[in-house]
Amino acid sequence: MTGTQMRPAERNLGSGDTHPQAPILEVKNLVLNYEVKEGMVSAVEDVSFALPKGRSLGLVGESGCGKTSVALTLMRLTANNARVLGGEVILDGVNLLELDKEQMRLRRWADISMVFQGAMNSWNPVYTVGVQIREAMDIHWDPKPSASEARAKTEELFNLVGIDPEMIDRYPHEFSGGMKQRAVIAMALSCDPKVIIADEPTTALDVIVQEQILEELKKIQRDLGMSIVYISHDIAVIAEITDLMGVMYAGKLVEFGPTADIFARPRHPYTWLILSSTPSITGPRRQLAPLEGEPPNLLDPPTGCRFHPRCPFVIEICRTDEPTLTEIEPGHTIACWNYTQVPVTLSRGDE
Ligand SMILES: Nc1ncnc2c1ncn2[C@@H]1O[C@H](COP(=O)(O)OP(=O)(O)OP(=O)(O)O)[C@@H](O)[C@H]1O
Ligand code: SF4
Ligand SMILES: [Mg+2]
């Protein structure tokens, strides 16, 4: 298979769709460090992107590139040693980073919710799943739902995520891993959020269950017109379920644009390399194949372009000057000094 054949699903936004709806979520110039005893870990550096209403946006990149840090900042749930040094997170016109704790507590789950990495293990074994979902509704619905309203909503959500509503009164240990994860998704939807963030929601599940859950998520996104941020190592998943994608490397967003366009022609060297090393987006699910070299230590990131020590297209300026995000096509941006040298086709040959 050649690079130009590697196309995500047809439904994805193509380059023709250059005037999407107004964004429901805008992240502007976000900078986040973690304070550790050795210094500051530069986990998110000047990241900006916009998610139009009703669309799905994928964040992809190697482990440790800052995907979860971005997601937790959107939820205002970062670790105690996290320092947001700049930027804005605008959800439906409101900058979440300017809200006080109480204002944010009211919006979290109600306006923006998240399925965490490994969330299926976070159910409290002592209570039924239905009770735990009801609890979330009690806190965030205004007014609180009546018992029958809460039950009707939970039944609706269980049907939506593919769980038999009979399971509402069962305990977490009576659910399989896949069912527990579906119930987490139901809980994340229980307050009708404007945006949902799914951080590796299918990792740790077997492949068939992963496929089923992805199908459900796609259906939910389509049927409810959900706006979703989807985080994954798995480039095939991003191809399958997102309209837009952002590629992160060492805390920086290096490429952003319509998923279909990026798969058809990756323009940033890092994106080009990861797509070149991905056997097939239609084949079995895979993690990103490891690239040569190591990601940098974010306590002391490289000067200039953070990718320069590993980049096959490096030129002198890359070592000293940081490339800024440049729009190369409408809605498609990259941060690279030398992108014109990136080949049109991927580096691997036919399989
Ligand atoms: N509380 C913390 N204190 C110090 N460093 C942290 C903390 N949390 C994350 N980091 C560091 O910040 C960087 C970004 O981490 P993050 O978890 O956001 O990456 P990720 O892209 O989600 O990785 P993965 O794909 O493995 O989930 C990494 O270098 C990580 O070690
Ligand atoms: S700016 Fe230079 S080092 Fe960075 S990705 Fe582009 S060519 Fe490679
Ligand atoms: Mg993560």
Image (cartoon, rainbow, N blue to C red):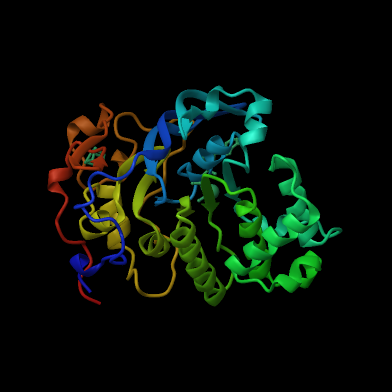
> Looking at the rendering, which quadrant does residue 155 occupy?
bottom right
Residue occupying image coordinates x 26% and y 66%: 7
Residue 237 is situated, as x and y percent measured from the top left of the image, at 42, 63
> Can you say which quadrant of the picture contains the C terminus?
bottom left
Judging depth in this view, the residue of 210 and 322 nearest the camera is 210
Taking the image as shown, residue 16 lies to the left or right of residue 144, namely: left
State whether residue 175 appears in this view.
no
Residue occupying image coordinates x 32% and y 57%: 274
> Looking at the rendering, which quadrant does residue 172 occupy?
bottom right
Judging depth in this view, the residue of 83 and 186 nearest the camera is 186
Task: Residue lying at the far right in this picture: please name it.
Answer: 126
Residue 177 is situated, as x and y percent measured from the top left of the image, at 67, 69
Residue occupying image coordinates x 54% and y 26%: 97
Taking the image as shown, residue 24 lies to the left or right of residue 69, namely: left
State whether residue 249 appears in this view.
yes
| Above or below for 132 versus 306 | below
Residue occupying image coordinates x 66% and y 34%: 106
Judging depth in this view, the residue of 1 and 26 nearest the camera is 26
Taking the image as shown, residue 241 lies to the left or right of residue 4, namely: right
Judging depth in this view, the residue of 306 and 329 nearest the camera is 329
| Above or below for 91 versus 54 | above
Residue 93 is situated, as x and y percent measured from the top left of the image, at 45, 30
Residue 6 is situated, as x and y percent measured from the top left of the image, at 25, 67
| Above or below for 116 versus 251 | below
